[in-house]
């Protein structure tokens, strides 16, 4: 069983609020990712990290930011939430290397009203 | 650059019937291939992976997939589906890009199993 956790599972928040989605893993993985999942289920990579103090933007442009101060923790922050940010956000981690599987958290479903 | 194409957005099938979910990929370098399943309101769970060796890969829940390099395909199959197999299925490819590996997903195929 994967040891990667996301909180909260569900969040409804008003426009303009600052939010942080938490993601933690206990597997010691160097690589971590954030995906945004459309209502039509397609996954878009928005951020990734190869280790502490490493963060990169993914294929889909996002107004969110991430940080990687500790190996196990990869939070995602929206400074000012908007209805267009309503989506499901999935965090994942993997060992370093191209032939390793990614382990996913259960996701955070964000609704901005 | 690499890409993954899942040819069917939705596949309806009756219980106990066989099913095939199609996946084609493009990549200019060696690839590693994965199938994930997502149940409603859950994260993704690995079904199976192809890294090297035998082109027929067996996974969990009775699923298997065959890697075909000449056709650049990695189709997922199950000989007899259950209602509980209803879920979204994602094909993914991992390969090296500028010294780093990236994981690219297809758009997903919704498998709908009815009695």
Image: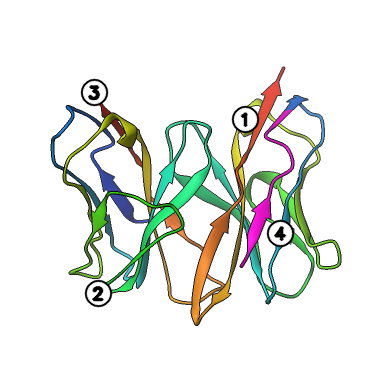
Tell me the residue that label 3 is attached to: A113
Q: CA distance from mark 3 to mark 4?
A: 38 Å
The chain identifier of the residue carrying mark 4 reads B
Q: CA distance from mark 2 to mark 3?
A: 34 Å
The chain identifier of the residue carrying mark 1 reads B
Residue contact at pointers 4 and 2, CB within 8 angstroms: no
Across and down, in percent, residue B23 comes to 73, 50
- On residue A52, which mark appears? 2
Say if labels 1 and 2 share a chain: no
Label tally: 4
Tell me the residue that label 1 is attached to: B86
The chain identifier of the residue carrying mark 2 reads A
Q: Nearer the viewer, residue B28 or A105?
A: B28
Crowd tier of the residue under label 2, counting other residues whose Cα lies within 10 Å: few below 14, some 14–19, many 20 or above? some
Crowd tier of the residue under label 4, counting other residues whose Cα lies within 10 Å: few below 14, some 14–19, many 20 or above? many
Mark closest to the chain's N terminus, 2 or 3: 2
Residue B20 quadrant: top right
In the displayed structure, would residue A70 be above or below residue A63?
A: below
Residue A58 quadrant: bottom left
The chain identifier of the residue carrying mark 3 reads A
**Is residue B8 a member of the stretch shown in magenta?**
yes
Magenta range is: B1-11
In the displayed structure, would residue A84 be above or below residue B89?
A: above
Residue contact at pointers 3 and 4, CB within 8 angstroms: no
Front tag of 1 and 2: 2
Across and down, in percent, residue B49 comes to 64, 61
Tell me the residue that label 4 is attached to: B25
Quarter the C terminus of chain B occupies: top right
Q: Nearer the viewer, residue B86 or B94?
A: B94
């Amino acid at each position: 069983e994967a040891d990667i956790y996301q909180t909260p599972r569900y969040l409804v928040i008003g426009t303009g609020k600052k939010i942080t989605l938490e993601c933690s893993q206990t597997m010691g993985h160097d690589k971590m990712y954030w995906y945004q999942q459309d209502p039509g289920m397609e996954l878009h990579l928005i951020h990734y990290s190869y280790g502490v103090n490493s963060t990169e933007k993914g294929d889909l442009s996002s107004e969110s930011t991430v940080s990687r101060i500790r190996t196990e923790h990869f939070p995602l922050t929206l400074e000012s939430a908007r209805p267009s940010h309503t989506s499901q956000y999935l965090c994942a981690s993997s060992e370093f290397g191209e032939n390793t599987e990614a382990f996913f958290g259960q996701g955070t479903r964000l609704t901005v009203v | 650059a690499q890409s993954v194409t899942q040819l069917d957005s939705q596949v309806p099938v009756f219980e106990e019937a066989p099913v095939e979910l199609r996946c084609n990929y493009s990549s200019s370098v060696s690839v590693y291939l994965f199938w994930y399943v997502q149940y409603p309101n859950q994260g993704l769970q690995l079904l199976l992976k192809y890294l090297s060796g035998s082109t027929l890969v067996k996974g969990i829940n009775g699923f298997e997939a065959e890697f075909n390099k000449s056709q650049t395909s990695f189709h997922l199959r199950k000989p007899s589906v259950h209602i509980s197999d209803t879920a979204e299925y994602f094909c993914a490819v991992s390969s090296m890009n500028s010294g780093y590996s990236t994981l690219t997903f297809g758009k997903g195929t919704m498998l709908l199993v009815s009695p």
